[in-house]
Amino acid sequence: MGKKQAAAASVRDALRVTPGSESVLLKPGDTPIGPTSKAKATEELAEAGAELAALQEALWAEGTFGGGDRRVLLVLQGMDTSGKGGTIEHVFGLMNPQGVRVASFKKPTPAERRHDFLWRIRKQVPGPGLVGVFDRSHYEDVLVVRVENLVEPPVWEARYQQINDFESELVEQGVAVVKCFLHISAEEQKARLLARLEDPAKRWKYNPDDLIARAKWSQYEQAYAAALGRCSTAVAPWYVVPADRKWYRNWAIARILLETLRDLDPQLPSIDFDLDAELKRLKKNDPLG
Amino acid sequence: MGKKQAAAASVRDALRVTPGSESVLLKPGDTPIGPTSKAKATEELAEAGAELAALQEALWAEGTFGGGDRRVLLVLQGMDTSGKGGTIEHVFGLMNPQGVRVASFKKPTPAERRHDFLWRIRKQVPGPGLVGVFDRSHYEDVLVVRVENLVEPPVWEARYQQINDFESELVEQGVAVVKCFLHISAEEQKARLLARLEDPAKRWKYNPDDLIARAKWSQYEQAYAAALGRCSTAVAPWYVVPADRKWYRNWAIARILLETLRDLDPQLPSIDFDLDAELKRLKKNDPLG
């Protein structure tokens, strides 16, 4: 495959999870498409960033001033240290903060627990014109909740369909739903946890409870495989992002967002005033001279 | 004054509005402190940005993981084209999107109008650890509302005190309230409006109604002077940011935020686990080897 073809290939096609699949096929260190060096990935990330920022501005204009309904929601999931925060910093940092909304979902509060699991999620769906990102999401309710038996199996079993229904509804409302699983290896997680412990400036990021989830690695693998396979739909696909290399992770997510925004092809609002008349008002009839 | 002293001088002291003052003394083209060239301002903005990002991360850590209550709220007000959006892009773009919350206040919806004017504002106050920015704010209720007689005078008259009470309450809750008036001249606004009309890619930003506000320039000047003088308090001061030069505006606001965050002196959370025990758990007793 020549360079031009490689550049035109779809990152989404390369990383998309086949609906109904039963296991995660890509490995955390894979680079199935795109750059294979940090230098090249950094260069391409900067290029993607400029186009991403321009498309985001157009989407924001369309939604805020043009009456459009469309917006983007990126769902980030992954084990501890998989880089959800780093993705937000490095990929969303390329866009205008005015059009970005970040929502982080932690352990539900007692108030949140008294509601349906989607209640707190619905409140954070980005408005028209925005690019929203969920740092963890409603998928926790079929991940940690399933692994830790926080509800009875029939309850979490029913949630896959409830999630698909919810996401279909979002898509109908104009939300482009993009879901990325940041896929790291147990070895890489260990290295990152050790780095947190060894650096006094990063030590606060370490939580002893992370090792509880780590000890159940294979159960989480199963829970992720089920969530990805059962909830990767035609309208709201899951992507597996190999995330052992931070530069590949950032590159891939920026490209997935870029392809999504290119498809949306946001349009700057058309003007509904008489241009010449306005120029005249401002140039000739301006009381301030 | 030598270079060292100039660098140490407080931008907040230079731009702060004296409580009870009756007019805006600084002019839109002034550079009362700091750089007087774009090149120097850009260099200093980048320097400030690095420190701002580090302090913001510490504040976010303190509020999110450390149980702290503190946060920052920047209120941006100014006439159309004064650069509220540009400030958000260029100053907030220096920080990690994860810790930033942007709220834009447009003409109130019918639902919002059925509530007290502070109702929609309270819902957008940033949570612990965040740096929030209001693109327009509760001050619209003593600006456009006053100029356009949208409520009876006793109603808007009472709001100055209501605003001061509200902001005191925020400060007691741990919110550092920083209010910046982006001060542009009528001449500069005219140039910016013409630029919007003349550039097809910017034309959508133009709103014929902007000229309605422009035609009442001196009434807005009076309304701003009243809001700034009556609501610049010891706990929640107003700053006048000369904004005819975009590079000066961005530099000044970044520095005001930097001084605010330095004063807060956010602390990374202290760890509440046994470091050696955790290292051992991870290195020796890790089931994943």
Image: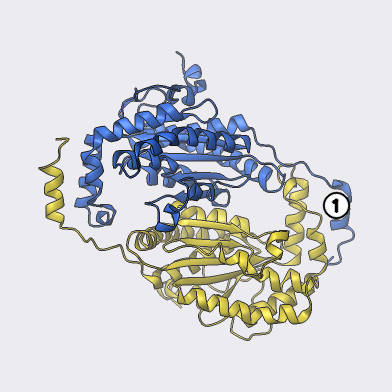
Chain colours: A blue, B yellow
Q: Residue furthest bottom?
A: B20
Q: Quadrant of residue B7?
A: bottom left
Q: Nearer the viewer, residue B260 or A65?
A: A65
Q: Horizontal placement of B52 versus B195: left or right?
A: left
Q: Picture coordinates of residue A217 (x, y %)?
A: 25, 36
Q: Horizontal placement of A5 versus A264: left or right?
A: left
Q: Picture coordinates of residue A152 (x, y %)?
A: 34, 40
Three-letter residue code for mark 1: Glu
Q: Horizontal placement of A139 versus A236: left or right?
A: left
Circle 1 sits on which residue? Answer: A278
Q: Horizontal placement of A94 versus A71: left or right?
A: left
Query: Could you tell me which residue is drawn at 56 percent across and 42 percent down?
Result: A53
> Is the residue B253 above or below the residue B166 in the image?
above
Say which element carries label 1.
Answer: helix
> Is the residue B50 above or below the residue B200 in the image?
below
Q: Nearer the viewer, residue B119 or B197?
A: B119
Q: Picture coordinates of residue B79 (x, y %)?
A: 71, 65
